[in-house]
Amino acid sequence: MVRAGLLAVLLALPVPPAWAQQAPGDVVVVEGDAIPEPLAVRPGDAARGRAIVANRSVGLCLLCHSGPIPEERFQGTLAPSLAGAGARWSVGQLRLRIADGARLNPDTIMPPYYRTTGLHRVARAFEGKTILTAEQIEDVVAYLATLKD
């Protein structure tokens, strides 16, 4: 209730708050092996997250990972299964692994879904853009957090 009231006050301001003025991928606070705070104001939605994970044109997750999405064929085996991800990692740990897994493992083949700097060989059309939005990251995190088995 308090959060909704605060959001209403912020949206009524004539100047957007600082978080709304930041470029995607900017100012992400990492604590240990996690990003403890959500990247978006709107809470993640597990159903939207599942759709992103399953979509071979958006997240491309199933290119490398397998997961409990039986209707999707030809799932990857290059990376760990997503099954049980919510039992293995906290929400903050999942968020960092998706946003920028290279912070944990510089040799990872997983793309940084929410980083725009320090990248090599990026097509001009994609320079300065994240692969997923903050809202999409939160949706994927919400979905992965439900995968306890």
Image (cartoon, grey):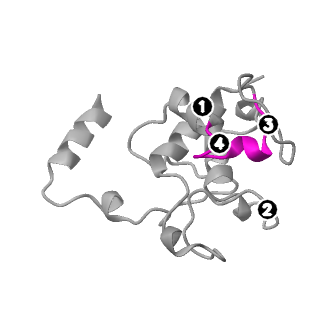
Q: Position of residue 101 (x, y in %)?
A: 70, 57
Q: Which image quarter is the N terminus in?
A: top left
The disc labelled 2 sits on which kind of residue?
A: Asn
Q: Amino acid at mark 4?
A: Arg
Mark 4 or 2, nearer chain start = 4
Q: Is residue 39 visible?
A: no
Q: Position of residue 39 (x, y in %)?
A: 47, 50
Q: Which residues are magenta?
A: 55-67
Principal secondary structure, stretch drawn in magenta: loop
List the residue tagged with mark 4. 56
User: What separation in Å lies between label 4 and label 3 (alpha carbons)?
Assistant: 10 Å
Displayed quadrant of residue 5:
top left
Q: Which residue is mark 3?
A: 75
| Residue occupied by mark 1 | 50
Local crowd size for mark 3, using a 10 Å CA cut-off: few (<14), some (14–19), many (≥20):
some
Query: Which x, y percent locates residue 148?
Result: 73, 25
Does dot 3 land on a helix, a strand or a loop? loop
Query: Which of pointers 4 and 2 indicates the residue nearer the eye?
Result: 4
Which tag is nearer the camera, tag 1 or tag 2? 1
Observer able to see residue 140? yes
Residue 75 colored magenta?
no
Cα distance, mark 4 to mark 2? Answer: 24 Å
In primary-sequence order, the first of circles 1 and 2 is: 1
**At numbered mark 2, what does the secondary structure look like: helix, strand or loop?**
loop
Residue annotated with mark 2: 105
Q: Closer to the camera, 46 or 64? A: 64
Q: On the rendered structure, is 18 left or right of 5?
A: right
The answer to which of marks 1 and 4 sits earlier in the sequence is 1
